[in-house]
Image (cartoon, rainbow, N blue to C red):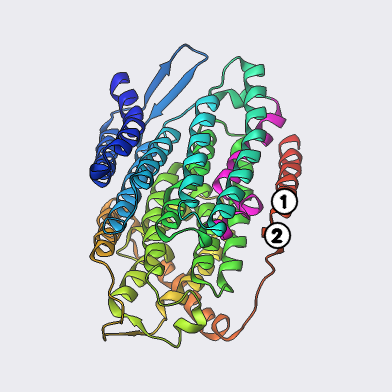
Amino acid sequence: MNDLTVAWIALPFFVGFVSSLLPQLDRYLALGITLVSSSFALWAFQLPEQLTLQLLDNFGVTLIVDSLSGLFILTNALVTAAVILYCWQSKKSAFFYAQTVILHGSINAVFICADFISLYVALEVTGIAAFLLIAYPRTARSIWVGLRYLFVSNTAMLFYLIGAVLVYKANHSFAFIGLQGAPPEALALICLGLLTKGGVFLSGLWLPMTYSESHTPISALLAGVVSKTGIFPLARCALMVEEIEPVIQIFSVGAALLGVTYASFESDTKRMLAWSSISQLGFVLAAPPVAGVYGLTHGLAKAALFLGTGNLPSRDFQVLRQTPIQRSLWIVLAIASLSISGFPLLAGYEAKIMTLQSLVPWHSIALNIAAVGTSIVYAHFIFLPFTQKPVAEAIQPSFWWAILLLLGGLVATNSLFPEMYTVTNLIKALGMIVAGWLIYGLIVQKVNFKLPRIWEQLEHLIGTMSLVLILLFWMVLS
């Protein structure tokens, strides 16, 4: 078991370097790695109990493989495979596929780490690989956005590293469970680093520009899996250390409400999806026991939406409302939007119901409001006009292979929890969706209101990070 897991972690990095030497095989090698990850995830589901690996010694690297990590690994495999298929007919270089595989491997490592020092290494590799992919077009804009992302990420990880050292000082171990006996400032610093890395609440104000300005397949990767690298450790720690749960409950509500508020009044398609990602990450974080289920459904749907918007004739909703889009593309956007909204017969329904049922009353009320807001947000896509006439520029066949994988995953995983299909749950889910659509049609669609973007400027990102740190110190000390 140990050798198999270590080989699986190392394989993407080895293949990433090999693909640079064999550019004619780069796409095939990259796709093969995602198949290996899918197989590993399915194997994790079959384990009778949690598999824990201690490497080096008792104070060294700790790895945990279970159903929670399996769901996140499967999300990574499916989203990465879809992005590779999407780029199949493009002229992407071997460097692109090498970095994609390295990013994939480092994200996999995050999803099985159970100690703070190996998690730090995996997160840093993830940040560097993500930066190289964001800057891949080599335009001045893409390089600036990539550097901005890298600067914020590295600053957050410095706070995280200080917190990890405090954990070790208190327990002589970097294991997640060490948070239980660590000083409260260690919890605050580690949470700040992970919340920023995941793009949660005010710590995630770097996210809208990064997602919206990145190349379409990179946006899909960032929203589908990269943001989960900050969420997964928080969920894992919350299941081990009960002191973390009140902290992430408050931040999950803040993220969910902030994200839908901005997304509802956003006129740019990619920025709307980016703000919605902040909201949906709040849902993923809200209920750690089912975080993997919500993370899977959100990752598949959000990747499909970003790939779909990359083929729209415009990013401006005002233009799209006056220019009918291709019907097949509208169907893709509508299915993915309905899944995130929690429509029955799609996996997002089960994930949303399971999450809402796992919450305490005050938490549930806030996230039910955010769920209605989610329906308002995705009504932007559902009520776009469409046409059966062929468009001037045909969509590449590789796009449809990627979409088939993502939407097929949403349909296939819908049958995992049939007990969620009760009359009460169905009425509640449909009621929230209809309420959101009515609010969109009667109010949101008719107003032209823009919320300020000043907080997204680089000089303010560190300021908001400092405010979040003060809030975390106050919360853990009280």
The answer to whether 274 is drawn above or below residue 180 in the figure is: below
Query: Alpha-carbon neighbours of circle 2 within 10 Å: few (<14), some, or many (≥20)?
Result: some
Measured as percent of width and height from the top left, residue 214 is found at 49, 58
Disc 2 + disc 1, Cβ < 8 Å: yes
Magenta span includes 256: no
Q: Secondary structure at mark 1?
A: helix
| Dot 1 amino acid type | Thr
Measured as percent of width and height from the top left, residue 79 is found at 35, 51
Measured as percent of width and height from the top left, residue 433 is found at 44, 72
Return the residue at label 2. Answer: 455
Return the residue at label 1. Answer: 464
The answer to whether 204 is drawn above or below residue 271 in the figure is: above
Q: Which residues are magenta?
A: 183-210
Q: Quadrant of residue 189?
A: top right
For this view, does 112 lie left or right of residue 35?
right
The answer to whether 119 is drawn above or below residue 31 in the figure is: above
Query: Which quadrant of the rendered structure holds the C terminus?
Result: top right
The answer to whether 255 is drawn above or below residue 383 in the figure is: above
